Image (cartoon, grey):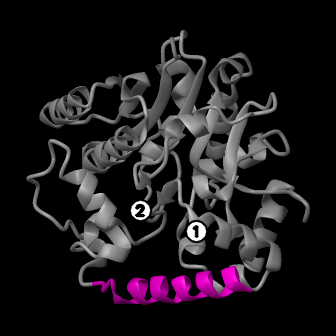
Amino acid sequence: MNENINIVFACDSNYAQHATVAMMSILKNTADPARIVFYLLDDQIDAAVKEKIQATIEQAHAAIHFCEVEADRFEKFFVSGQLSRAAYFRLEMGRLLPDSVGKVIYLDCDLLVLDDIAELWNYDMNHHPLAAIMDLGIMASSKDWHGKQEQLGFSEEDIYFNSGVLVVDLKDWREHDYGRQAEQLAERNNYRHHDQDALNQLFHRDWQPVPLRWNVIPPVWYLFLKILKRRDFRRMAVEARKYISILHYAGGYKPWEYDRYAAFNAKYYEYLRQTEFCSVKMPQPDPRRKGRSIVRQLRRLKLADFWQRFFTVV
């Protein structure tokens, strides 16, 4: 009998719909949905919203468990931009999940899984407590990367990861109390990239890199110039875009904020239609960014597709 694949999300009511869409993308692209067990770290999600989530998951023959987080647990932690305190909840995984759960995949809510999650689950962690994906957006930025080296004590040869997709040895996490250590670092330092910086400092040189296609963030998806200029980064990014396993809408442009555009967010709408949230009013623009056009992003994608073809031929 195949073991369960344990997947953790964290959100409040505002992001519950998007977490459910991400879950549906997992279920529609895995060979065996019955293996999937979701754990949702629950920031006071409304009861009616929980019912929709549970109905969606159970109709797809998977399981979900809600793990309530103390309302004021991260009240004093630094947040900025589109981030909410739920971003810190992953640090509490070891305490909130049953002791019988010894391994998990943690995923942010603003992503779509386009490949069988079992492949990521089975990736060899080489006895590291954590597996993750390099953050090319930060590493390709001279300013950001030098800032990380200075604040986190990294060298030029080190690698910085994005915390939106993690494979975690939860047994090891509990034994070493990694969650508490990361919380202490985050609370003490007010990092620019919040829990992500804390996790990178904590697991410095003790994590397993996973191929870039498992966390394609906007700088890779759009093939930003700072990535194209470096041959090694360009090669990795072009390869990741050929077959995207996880498309991560990190940053300011979220798929639910705009009408359906085939190149940008069609998959989000496709999976949304298969959830109990299918009748919600769309799009759902962020009032803080009211009226911001999607045109620039669509142009970026067209240009990225051109560079993709060009460098594939070359």
Identify the residue at image location x=55%, y=83%: 304
Residue under circle 2?
A: 82
- Rendered residue at 20%/32% (across/down): 50
The answer to whether any part of residue 249 appears in the image is: yes
Along the line of sight, the residue nearer the viewer: 77 or 32: 32
Which type of secondary structure does the marked residue at label 1 adopt?
helix
Q: Position of residue 43 (x, y in %)?
A: 33, 36
Q: Earlier in the sequence, mark 1 or mark 2?
A: 2
Q: Quadrant of residue 254?
A: bottom left
Residue 189 showing in the rendered view? no
Q: Residue 111 got which mark?
A: none
**Amino acid type of the residue tagged 2 in the rendering:** Gln
| Nearer to the camera, 141 or 25 | 25
Residue indicated by mark 1: 241
Q: Is residue 304 left or right of residue 129?
A: left
- Of 85 and 94, the residue lying toward us: 94
The residue closer to the viewer here, 259 or 31, is 31
Residue 44: where, in percent of width, then height? 27, 34
Residue 192 at x, y percent in the picture: 62, 61
Along the horizontal axis of the image, is 98 left or right of 253?
right
Numbered range of the magenta stretch: 292-314
Magenta residue check for 297: yes
Badge 1: few (under 14), some or many (20 or more) residues near its Cα, within 10 Å? many
Q: Is residue 245 above or below residue 128?
A: below
Tell me the residue at 41%/39% (across/down).
10
130 vs 152, left or right, is: left
Q: Residue furthest front?
A: 313
Give residue 12's quadrant in the image: top left
Answer above or below: position of 84 versus 32.
below
